[in-house]
Image (cartoon, grey):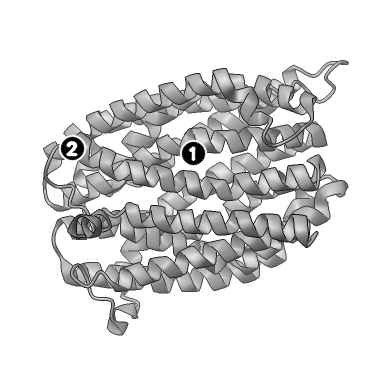
Amino acid sequence: MERFKKLFAAVDMTDGSPWEKILLFTFPMLLGNIAQQLYNTVDSVVVGKYIGDNALAAVGSAGPIFNLLLVLFIGISTGATIMVSQYFGARKREELSKTIGNCIVLTAIASVFIMVVATLASRPLLILLDTPESILDWCTSYLQILFIGIAGLAFYNILCGVLRGLGDSVSALVYLVVASILNIVLDVFFVAKCNMGVAGVALATVIAQAVSAVLCVCKLMRMKDLFDFKLKYFKLDKEIAWNVIRLGLPSGITQAIMSMAMILVQALTNSFGEQFIAANVIIMRVDGFAMLPNFSFGTAMTTYAGQNVGAGQHERVSKGAKQGTVMALGTSAVITGAILIFGKYLMGIFTDTASLVDLSMSMMRILAVGYIAVAVTQSLSGVMRGAGDTMTPMWISIVQTIIIRVPLAYGLVYLTMSDAYPNGRPECLFISLLTSWVLGAILTAIFYRRGKWRKDAL
């Protein structure tokens, strides 16, 4: 029983073997991220199988806009992870309690703002992106339901950021598994049984996310040995709130930049028609799973670096960074091989249309090797963020997406226009993405070696 309780306790990453601590933290989080990815994947499978390829395209077209309008939550979550991990590593109970309370209040404020603004802005943004008329209504209803119920997603992500900062990645895994199972059941019920279409998929996701958020709150209320979950800590503290925003905002801006790039490229994607839009959705779903180890190692490195910087153990941070990056590279290499060998079977899960599967797989082959480059970017960026340097990864992201990816995508499409391809060759979109990933990894490695992150602890 004692061992079981320890599994769900906060983990001190300031002692013991770095690679073991990183791996033990990463594995449950990876499983949790897989469960979270199931939200989108099950949505796509149910939509593609029960409604059709156009509905699948609708869900995919809504994705970039949804991600763009989540930047506030990405920022708060990142700021929470960094501050919680550093204060936990420094054993500062009072500051830790204030940080957690302030993060919850900031999340509530941001949720109300996004619920109102994003719900009203959904359809105009879709029209601005030249979303095909055949899927416009589906896209709009899907987005509006997600934004009306945004509080569940927001609180889950921010509170998971708090739990990660404390070194607890197992609780988040359990809550996500519960929510994922609920999401699958509700997806099938609302779409297959109630014939609610795309709206049913969105409603299932909102309900499942709300359940996972409630479970996170209950967990935090039981962690009284580490911090105080009292009403007085829910009063906004100017300094702490500013630090959460200051540290998290660059990550939010990074997410916004990536989402803007996706939206700009989505306009190109839409020009190739519904078939290519649906193929892009399938690719992005497989891509989501392929990226999970990279994101998991990146988040683990943020917590590891934060706790050890808080404890003043800078050399231990460097040692863990090397070991974590090697593990991330090895994992990505295995996944890349699996995609190249079994990718076609994965594509077939989403649709029964053979031509759509072939198109999706041909594009996926272009991207596959890029996941190894992203392993470097995520791991080393995670170290820099955990130490408090969130600006460097943001600037690298700006260069990677705004200066490299978007111009390259439009330029290659323009250069490949012909009678056979009046809108250019669609594979140019994925060549530009692969190029940006590789150059981003090189820039990240260079700036990590320069070591500005060593000077940016709280």
Q: Nearer the viewer, residue 413 or 212?
A: 212
Q: Nearer the viewer, residue 228 or 107?
A: 228
Mark 1 lies on a secondary structure that is helix
Q: Is residue 296 left or right of residue 56?
A: left
Q: How many C-alpha atoms fall within 10 Å of the one at disc 1: few (<14), some, or many (≥20)?
A: many
Q: Is residue 291 left or right of residue 452?
A: right
Q: Which residue is mark 1?
A: 398
Snapshot quadrant of residue 455: top left
Mark 2 lies on a secondary structure that is helix
Find residue 138 and name its label. Answer: none
Q: Which residue is mark 2?
A: 18
- Which residue is farthest front? 1
User: Against 281, is 434 above or below?
Assistant: above
Q: Is residue 365 left or right of residue 5?
A: right
Where residue 110 appears, as percent x and y from the top left, is 50, 68
User: Against 55, is 436 above or below?
Assistant: above
Report the amino acid beneath label 1.
Answer: Ile
Q: How many C-alpha atoms fall within 10 Å of the one at disc 2: few (<14), some, or many (≥20)?
A: many
User: Against 296, is 330 above or below?
Assistant: above
Where residue 417 appears, as percent x and y from the top left, is 80, 19
What residue do we see at 39% from left, 65% from top? 216
Where residue 453 appears, as percent x and y from the top left, is 25, 41
What residue do we see at 34% from left, 62% from top? 244
Q: Nearer the viewer, residue 242 or 61?
A: 61
What residue do we see at 37% from left, 68% from top? 103
Report the amino acid beneath label 2.
Answer: Pro
Q: Is residue 188 left or right of residue 166?
A: right
Q: Nearer the viewer, mark 1 or mark 2?
A: 2
Snapshot quadrant of residue 443: top left
Q: Is residue 289 visible?
A: yes
Q: Nearer the viewer, residue 206 or 295?
A: 206
Q: Reading the chain from its start, which is encountered first: label 1 or label 2?
A: 2
